[in-house]
Image (tube, rainbow, N blue to C red):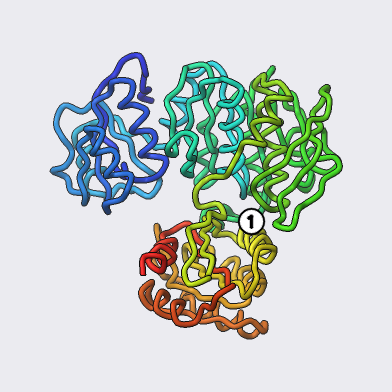
Amino acid sequence: MYTIDLDRPCRVYFIGIGGSSMSGLAEFLYHYGFDVSGSDRDESKYTRKLRGMGMTVHIGQKAENVPEGLDAVVYTAAVHADNPEYARAAQMGLPLINRAVLLGQIMKAHHKSAAISGTHGKTTTSAMTVDILLHAGMDPSVSIGGVLDSIGGNSRVGSRETFVAEACEFTNSFLEMYPEVAAVLNIEEDHLDFFKDLDDIRHSFREFLSHVPEGGTAVIGAAIDRWQELVEGLPCRVVTFGEGGDITARDLVYDEEGRGSFLLCLPGEEPQPVRLTVSGAHNVLDALAAAGTCQAMGVPADAIAEGLNAYTGARRRFEKKGVLNGVEIYDDYGHHPTELKVTLEVAALKKKGRVWAVFQPFTYSRTKFLFEDFAQVLTLADEVVLTPIMGARETDTLGMDSEQLAARVRELGTSAIALPSFDAAEDYLFKKCEPGDLLITMGCGDAYKIGEALLSR
């Protein structure tokens, strides 16, 4: 397999360069002196940023975009053999590198690395980990899925000493990673268009943890069912977090907006006071996971606590966007029922009037496989507005649409409507929301544009 060597810059082309992870990897190579170019289907803030840095970025994917003289081509899981640029690169005999493989290669180029995995909470835990390391005076390189204000984006080129990355299980991409520290936050049914069932998912997480070397550390949630099976016989150190685990939040209390304060208890350390600025019990668990990860990377307990106290959140994680006519507008990246549940629970703590859940379902398969879970969770809102399903890598072969989900939510006793477009949703919300209401757009697509459009009125 072709290996990218950070000490030997060459010419690399990215198919799908505008993705959050791909754009970060492109920036990384560009920083090390590589000649980087690429393409994406649509213009975005990422493509504009890369072009502003000096990279050639094509909008639209055509065979003629692929230049002569390349050394390698990087592509995402969404790119297949029938993609014209992929086909052209194969015809030219160029090495074709999957995004996950490149990420794993960059990780190996660092002395100590941490990979954060799990069905939920990866971005928040990764962001907390990064902020702790920065607060402790370290210089981490970073590749995460969300935008973090402290690093000005979703990636950071630091020293070759430490590296922090999100580790996504979809298509088993995290199996390309061999971190010194691996965190598993939780394991639930997801990506059932790829995995057979929960046992299949657990098998992949077990294999991921088996990549941690002797002398490394696995940080795993104590609430994971039969977590012992995932680490049995592994040569690395195992640390658990959460109730009944090695890392706990003692004397935990929440304020009126659900922000947790507690004593952080780490193995072998004196308890440290932590007061989070982000709301919800899920953020307390993410903080414990980040603390365990950073302790395994050599950060003292007091610096870990100080870093958590300074953490203010990642973009698109219950992010307040503004206020329109007395309506508070938030946005969240959540697109799995469990993620929607914790988001709506936090919204309920902050509301004065009604909670409006504006949800863009992601993929037909996830909506179908988790249909009843989505419907039940959405009843936590007072009013539900659904936009069309974002198909992403899929076409609708399952006969699934948002109106079916809205109908089921109504059957469960909650007001719900499916609207045909973002414009229709914007107009509806502008007319229906009242002062004191809280509106939150949710989904990993671009539902946030609805809130931004409302605020621009």
**Quadrant of the rendering where the N terminus is positioned:** top left
Residue at 82 percent across and 37 percent down: it is 245
Q: Position of residue 98 (x, y in %)?
A: 39, 37
**Quadrant of the rendering where the C terminus is positioned:** bottom left
Q: In this view, does 388 lie above or below 187?
A: below
Residue 69 seen in render: yes
Residue at 60 percent across and 81 percent down: it is 408
Question: Which residue in the structure is indicated by mark 1?
Answer: 189
Amino acid beneath label 1: Glu
Q: Position of residue 76 (x, y in %)?
A: 37, 43
Count of number-bearing discs: 1
- Corner quadrant of residue 318: bottom right
Residue at 31 percent across and 15 percent down: it is 8
In depth, the one of 206 and 181 nearer the eye is: 181
Q: Is residue 11 above or below residue 422?
A: above
Residue 394 seen in render: no
Residue at 59 percent across and 28 percent down: it is 114
Relative to 237, 82 lies left or right: left
Q: Where is residue 12 in the image (x, y as percent from the top left)?
A: 27, 29
Q: Label 1 neighbourhood size at 10 Å, few (<14), some (14-19), many (20+)?
A: some
Q: Position of residue 264 (x, y in %)?
A: 78, 34
Q: Name the element at disc 1.
A: loop
In depth, the one of 365 and 48 nearer the eye is: 48
Q: In this view, does 303 lie above or below 337?
A: above
Relative to 243, 22 lies left or right: left
Relative to 351, 225 lies left or right: right
